[in-house]
Image (cartoon, rainbow, N blue to C red):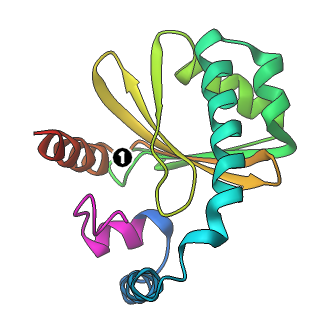
Amino acid sequence: MLHDIFRMPFDTIAQTIGRPTASCRQLAKRARQKIADGRAGARFDVESAEHRLVTDEFIAACASGDLDALLAVLTPDAWGDVDLGSAAAEPRAVVTGAENVATNLLRFWGPGSTLVSLPVGGQPALLGFHGRALAALLVLRMRGEQVEAVHVIADPAQIGFLSRQLSTSAR
């Protein structure tokens, strides 16, 4: 989806998800084939509806700054990481435990920021804005009806690329 819809290069996708470029190309090829064969739809409908509900609760908790509501949508062993790109002194930071994750989420994505749901490849994902500027892509990994992990992509190069793609597709 990142390649076909947002025109993100496979090299960038590979770096973001930590897989070889060839694997990303193969995954895209298989996904296109499943869609063409009509096998992609029904399998995700119920799961997607559950993900949307959890994502909506996640957004509401962040927007209101409600720590307890955010903790309710996170698994107790939740973890999160932030990809700041190769130019950062520490390009990847990892936080573990629901309370630590929730506290950090509210620090960066609480009141004053805007989160917009945009599922990516069947995964719940959020565009994170500060003001009117896209600041990050938050990809949520689910376990049942809770968020198990939050991967925040805040690499300026990748976010800049995504922002340009979004503004181009909005025209």
Q: Residue at x 60, y 26 (%)?
A: 59
Residue 149 in magenta stretch = no
Q: Percent from the top left, x then y, of residue 97?
A: 83, 40
| Residue tagged 1 | 155
Q: Residue at x 21, y 50 (%)?
A: 161
Q: Residue at x 69, y 37 (%)?
A: 53
Position of the C terminus, as image quadrant, is top left
Q: Residue at x 37, y 89 (%)?
A: 22
Q: Is residue 2 above or below residue 50?
A: below
Q: Amino acid at mark 1?
A: Asp
Q: Is residue 66 above or below residue 59?
A: above
Query: Which span is picked out in magenta?
Result: 1-15
| Front position in the image: 33 or 70 | 33
- Residue 149 is at least partly visible in this image: no
Position of the N terminus, as image quadrant, is bottom left
Q: Percent from the top left, x then y, of residue 119?
A: 49, 50
Predominant SS of the magenta segment: loop
